[in-house]
Image (tube, grey):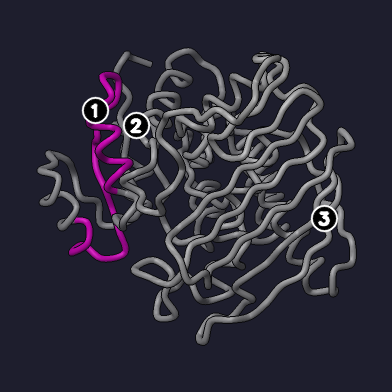
Amino acid sequence: MSEEIGAAINACGWVAREHARAYLNNPHTRLVGVTSRTRASAEKLVEELGLDCKIYPDYEALLDDDEVDAVSVTTPNFLHAQNAIDAARAGKHIVLEKPAGINEEELDELGAAVEAAGVTSIVSFVLRWNELVVNLKRLQERGAFGELFFCETDYWHGLGEVIRADRWLAKKDLAGSAFLTGGCHPVDMARFLCGEIASVSAYSHHGLEGFEYDTTVSAAVEFENGAVGRISSCLEIVAPYHFNIKLMGTEGTALGNRIWSRALTPRQSDFFELVCELPDSGDVAHHPFQEEIDHFAECILEGRDCDPNIADGIRTSRVCLAVDRSAAAGGEAQRPRY
């Protein structure tokens, strides 16, 4: 492959604009074209960003274009897996919006297709590039927290422009669940910071009229390394968006950006604060898509896979599905079907 990666976008909604901006700002990527459910939405994105690119009549035409090396799949949840399968079979590298899939069967097929194709892939758990998360990971690697024994992560995003009963997001067969829709972010974060999840036990509450699934779910989790924790997703909070990260270890604690570490500062008398960008907005324009796309392009050019790749994203979806099974069974413990 040349030093220029031809990229295209499938579906021109809210998040697609951030993918497009990131491709435009990366020196190794060129935005070849876009497609969407309606031509009008594709034309709107092209006009808003002043793009000089093709508008394909459909996804098949996009995948048939030899100029396209990579595709961003930004469709609704229920289309993610099949769209990514089609891209893999066409030999395209893949940026897949979360979640990777919304049922076990399509996750099986997706994993097999991507492995067989050998393409580079990334699942858009974009908060991994948030400054707070980057700093927490670095502190963890330096031993600031010691051995983690507790991890709590939460996605709380109430009614607004995104969370609405009149959108596809409220339909179970299109979105999946509160955990697959939003809760997959804290599941990925917990796995990223504390390791693989072995078992979950969850309870749920239905509080939003028009939603076909329970809109608040809380899960107690056990990690494979013996640590424990809690992960929740709430779509009915009456408050601004909030994403919690709490870590407790044998040498220290992180409560968001408030840090206590006897390993780093033995004479510490109070929490100190990391002054950095926090994951405190649900607006996708606030999220670090540039860093994600930069990582994706770098991995393509270096012939390696991304972190998190689709295989990793599949494991996060399987945890979400285990949470849903547990909540449906009244809290009965469930193991993810890795």
Spatial CA distance of label 1 from label 3 is: 41 Å
Q: Amino acid at mark 2?
A: Gln
The span shown in magenta is 17-42
Q: Mark 1 or mark 2, which has the lower sequence index?
A: 1
Spatial CA distance of label 1 from label 2 is: 8 Å
- 1 vs 3, front mark: 3
* Mark 3 Cα-neighbour bin, 10 Å: few <14, some 14–19, many ≥20: many
Residue 281 in percent (x, y) is at 40, 50
Measuring 85% from the left and 73% from the top, which residue is drawn there?
329
SS type, badge 3: strand
Residue carrying label 3: 200
The quarter holding residue 305 reads top right
SS type, badge 2: helix
Q: Mark 1 or mark 3, which has the lower sequence index?
A: 1
Q: Are marks 3 and 2 in contact (CB under 8 Å)?
A: no
Q: Which mark is residue 163?
A: none
Residue carrying label 2: 290
* Closer-to-camera residue (331/64): 331
Measuring 42% from the left and 15% from the top, which residue is drawn there?
301
* Closer-to-camera residue (15/5): 15
Q: Eyeballing the image, is 250 above or below 317? A: above
The quarter holding residue 43 reads bottom left
Q: Amino acid at mark 1?
A: Asn
Q: Which quarter of the image is occupied by the C terminus?
A: top right
Q: Are marks 1 and 2 in contact (CB under 8 Å)?
A: yes
Residue carrying label 1: 25
Q: Amino acid at mark 3?
A: Val
- Residue 19: in magenta span: yes
